[in-house]
C-alpha cells in the first residue's frame, strides 16, 4: 500500500502523483463528516469469472482487462452480475476496503436521497427553489424548480472550467474548501457563493448545462427541508437501507456544509451496491428503499430537447440526463454516473451487470480513457449477460 506523500496537501491533492494517495485519504486533507455504515450488511455472494480470454480496445491495441485498467490509471474495479460479485481488480497502491473519493458520482447519490424525500412527501420537485430557500430569490436559483436543479437545466451564468486558475470555478473551489484560500481575504463560504450566482441569458429548462454548483445547492436545500445534516441523510437513507459495509464520509466547507456535488468518499464495493439498487427497482434488504416510479423516471425521462441543445450531445448523441444520472440511449437502456479523474458507475439493466470503477487519472477529463472503459464495460456486460 502507498504511504503518505509528505508533500501532499490542499494545494496539490488532485495532481498526479499526489492524487494516488490523496483520493483514498481525503479526510487527512479536507474537513469531513462521517457517513455511518450499516449494522446489517448482507453477505455478498461471489461467482468469480475469469476474463483472461477477453481482449479490449486500447489506444495501444488489444489488451487484457488488467492492462486496460493500468493504462487508464484505474485504482479499483468491481463487477456484479445478478447481485453477485464476479470480478474485482485493484492497483498495488490501493486498499480495496478504503473509501475513495467519487467526485461527481456524489451528485447521483444525492439525487437518490432527493428521490426518497419526494417519495415521503417531504420534497416537491415541481416547486421553485425559492419556496424552500428564500435566500435564493435574488439569485439564479430562486425561480428555477427543484426538478430543473436535478436535471441540470438551470440557467446559470457559470463556466465549468477545471483548468483555468483565474476562472470563477477556482473561486467556487475555494468556497468548498478544496483549494487554499488567502487567509487575509478568505472569500465566501459555499452557501454565500451559491447565492451570488446569476442567470444566464436563456430561460430555465431550455438547455442542459452541466454545472456542479447546482448539486451543492440541492444538498443545502435537502438539509434545510429536513433540518438534518447531509452526512446523516446519506447514512439514514442510503448507507443503512442498502447495507453499506464500510463507513464513508463527505467533505465540508469551512462553515460545515457538505459538498453534495463531489465530496462523497466510499468503497468500490459499496458504490456497486448503489448500482444494484437500480437493477432491483429500488428494492434492498427486504424493503422498497426508493420507489420504482423514481427509478423508472430516472432511467427513461428527461428533456431530449434540452440535452440536444447542451454541450454533452457530441459525447453521447443518443443520451439524456435525468435526476443527475446519464442515460446512454442504447438498446440495453444503460445508465451511468460519472466523476472527474475517471470515476464511473455503469449499470446495464438488460444484462443485469453493474461495474464500479474508481480512478486517479491525472486529467480531470479524459475522453479517450472514458470511452475505452465504457466500451470495455459494454463488452463485459455482453459477455456475461
Image (tube, rainbow, N blue to C red):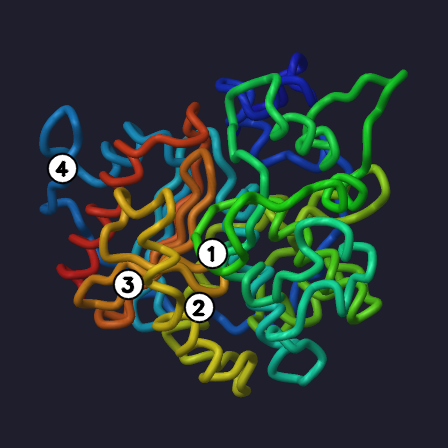
Q: Horizontal and vertical percent for residue 214? A: 61, 51
N-terminal of the pair, mark 4 or mark 3, is: 4
Q: Nearer the viewer, residue 143 or 297?
A: 143
Q: Spot the residue most to the right.
A: 184
Closer to the observer: label 1 or label 4? 4
Q: Horizontal and vertical percent for residue 123? A: 68, 76
Label 2–label 1 contact, CB within 8 A: yes
Q: Which residue is identified by label 2?
A: 44
Label 1–label 4 contact, CB within 8 A: no
Q: Residue at x 23, y 32 (%)?
A: 67
Cα–Cα span, label 3 and label 2 = 23 Å
Q: Spot the residue most to the top.
A: 7
Cα–Cα span, label 3 and label 1 = 20 Å
Q: Looking at the rendering, which quadrant does residue 147 occupy?
A: bottom right
Q: Looking at the rendering, which quadrant does residue 29 occupy?
A: top right
N-terminal of the pair, mark 2 or mark 1, is: 2
- Element type where label 1 sits in the image: helix
Amino acid at each position: 500500500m502507498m504511504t503518505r506523500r509528505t508533500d501532499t496537501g490542499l494545494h496539490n491533492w488532485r495532481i498526479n502523483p499526489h492524487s494516488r494517495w490523496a483520493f483514498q485519504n481525503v479526510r487527512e486533507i479536507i474537513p469531513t463528516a462521517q457517513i455511518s455504515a450499516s449494522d446489517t450488511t448482507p453477505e455478498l455472494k461471489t461467482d468469480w469469472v475469469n476474463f483472461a480470454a477477453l481482449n479490449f480496445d486500447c489506444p495501444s491495441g488489444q489488451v487484457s482487462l488488467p492492462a486496460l485498467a493500468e493504462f487508464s490509471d484505474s485504482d479499483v474495479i468491481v463487477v456484479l452480475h445478478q447481485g453477485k460479485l464476479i470480478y474485482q481488480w485493484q492497483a498495488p497502491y490501493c486498499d480495496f476496503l478504503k473509501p475513495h473519493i467519487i467526485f461527481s458520482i456524489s451528485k447521483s447519490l444525492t439525487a437518490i436521497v432527493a428521490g426518497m424525500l419526494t417519495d415521503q412527501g417531504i420534497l416537491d420537485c415541481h416547486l421553485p427553489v425559492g419556496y424552500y430557500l428564500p435566500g435564493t430569490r435574488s439569485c439564479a436559483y430562486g425561480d428555477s424548480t427543484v426538478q430543473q436543479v436535478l436535471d441540470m437545466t438551470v440557467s446559470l451564468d457559470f463556466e465549468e472550467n477545471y483548468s483555468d486558475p483565474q476562472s470563477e470555478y477556482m473561486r467556487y473551489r475555494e468556497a468548498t474548501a478544496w483549494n487554499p484560500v488567502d487567509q487575509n481575504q478568505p472569500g465566501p463560504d459555499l452557501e454565500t457563493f451559491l447565492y451570488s450566482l446569476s442567470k444566464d441569458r436563456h430561460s430555465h429548462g431550455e438547455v442542459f448545462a452541466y454545472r456542479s454548483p447546482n448539486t451543492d445547492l440541492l444538498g443545502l436545500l435537502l438539509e434545510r427541508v429536513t433540518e438534518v445534516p447531509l452526512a446523516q441523510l446519506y447514512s439514514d437513507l442510503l448507507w443503512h437501507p442498502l447495507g453499506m459495509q464500510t463507513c464513508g464520509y463527505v467533505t465540508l466547507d469551512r462553515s460545515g456544509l457538505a459538498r453534495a456535488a463531489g465530496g462523497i468518499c466510499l468503497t468500490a464495493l459499496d458504490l456497486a451496491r448503489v448500482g444494484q439498487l437500480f437493477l432491483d427497482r429500488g428494492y434492498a434488504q427486504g424493503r422498497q428503499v426508493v420507489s420504482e416510479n423514481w427509478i423508472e423516471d430516472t432511467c427513461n425521462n428527461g428533456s431530449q430537447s434540452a440535452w440536444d441543445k447542451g454541450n454533452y450531445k457530441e459525447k453521447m448523441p443518443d443520451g439524456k440526463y435525468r435526476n443527475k444520472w446519464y442515460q446512454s440511449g442504447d438498446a440495453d437502456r444503460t445508465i451511468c454516473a460519472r466523476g472527474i479523474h475517471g470515476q464511473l458507475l455503469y449499470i446495464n439493466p438488460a444484462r443485469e451487470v453493474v461495474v464500479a470503477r474508481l480512478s486517479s487519472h491525472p486529467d480531470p477529463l479524459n475522453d479517450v480513457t472514458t470511452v475505452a472503459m465504457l466500451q470495455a464495460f459494454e463488452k463485459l456486460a455482453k459477455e456475461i449477460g
